[in-house]
Amino acid sequence: MTTTAKATVPVRERVEHLDRRSSRKRLYIVGVGIAVLALFLMLRGFSAAKKETPTPPPRLVETAKAIQKDVPLYLEEIGTTAAFETVDVKPQVTGQIISREFTDGADVKKGDLLFRIDARPYEAVLASAKADLALAQTNLKRQNELRQKNVTATQELDTAQANAMRSEAAVAAAQVNLDFCNIKAPIDGRAGLRNVDVGNVVGPGGATPLVTVQGLDPIYTDFTVAEPDLPLVRRYLQNPNLKVLTDAEGDSVEPRSGDLYFIDSALQPGSGTVKLRGITPNPDHALWPAQFVRVRLILDVLKEAILVPGGAVQTGQNGPYVFVVKPDSTLDLRQVKAGQSQGDLTVINEGVRAGETVVVSGQLQLAPGAKVNPKEAAPVGAAPGAQHTKAIN
């Protein structure tokens, strides 16, 4: 009995062990099947979702057509204005000022009376010189009569002639000094603030002028150009289109067109610039001396230039580019050579033709070949042309 029990125990353990292995194998097979089924369902759902994703509509973009127009070739600089003429009015004779005939800051014409100096001493000198002249002329007449009768010597006649001429010169000098008692405006211009009042005694040689008069019409515009731009400026010096536009900041006056008056013959030491001066009509005195202004030196006129709104020009790794909308509303990326700004427009030297439609805004996430929904943008605020407008910043 004992032997039989010992033999049956290992057989039972082997059967149980085989049952456990079979159960684990079945569980493994079932797990793998579930995983495969889950992967299949996931891939099938992804494929279905991908097929069901709708195609996005074309992006809405603002567009404008490239236009063709004559525009200026120019340099823009910062400058200052200077009076056309500046005269310090000083006395030519000594005396007391007895009247002032102008208002500080008034516009005056050449010859207008500004000050009066007490003329009585000079009137007395003139009267005395005239009396001496009358006596000298009488003596000369007498000597001529005696000479004709051979009564007097030639030397006496010569002396009488010299005395008469000297007396004439004394009368002329006295008259000049008397005229200097009336101090007049030497030029057309604007009087500054007076430096002396009635009652002061003045005389020639003083360092302080009685008043300064500045000519404001026309007016000078002084500015500089950098050394690298000098060859370009010199190339167009004889061009009839060469103009200087002067514009003061913060006013409502249109830029003034003038002529180039002067270009210095040497560069300014240490700055690498050369000084230029324009001369500009200023009949309404809108420009004042020493005023900071923006200066546009127009060198020439670019005929039939291509222009697009400034917002159309983008910058990428290969340089400036624009998106051109083709007739089928798809995009073409064009590398361009951009020129100068003309108000809100930019000159395109190469890459776009007149009449082509370019994207003005909405370029973000656009790509060549993409389809877009173009909408014409509002007209730009500044039209291109030969005039410098305040829209140029």
Image: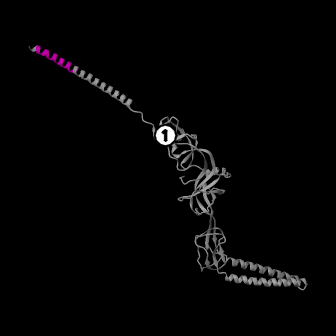
Q: Measured from the top left, where is residue 55 in percent x and y?
A: 42, 33
Q: Which of the colour schemes (rainbow, by chain, secondary structure, one colour) is used?
A: one colour
Q: Report the residue at 58% width, 54% height from top.
A: 77
Residues drawn in magenta = 4-21
Q: Is residue 312 above or below residue 188?
A: above
Q: Is residue 145 above or below residue 87?
A: below
Q: Quadrant of the N terminus?
A: top left
| Residue 263 visible to an observer of this rendering | no
Kindly identify the amino acid type of the residue bearing the numbered disc 1.
Pro
Query: Toward the viewer: 51 or 297?
Result: 51
Asked if the magenta segment contains residue 13, the reply would be: yes
Q: Which element carries disc 1, helix, strand or loop?
A: strand
Query: Toward the viewer: 198 or 356?
Result: 356
Return the residue at label 1: 374
Along the horizontal axis of the image, is 72 left or right of 378? Answer: right
Asked if the magenta segment contains residue 119, the reply would be: no
Point out the residue furthest to the right here.
Answer: 150
Q: Report the residue at 16% width, 16% height from top.
A: 11
Query: Toward the viewer: 24 or 251?
Result: 251
Q: Measured from the top left, where is residue 129 in percent x and y?
A: 74, 82
Q: Is residue 344 above or below residue 42?
A: below
The secondary structure making up most of the magenta span is: helix
| Residue 98 visible to an observer of this rendering | yes
Q: Measured from the top left, where is residue 137 in percent x and y?
A: 81, 82
Q: Is residue 173 above or below residue 5?
A: below
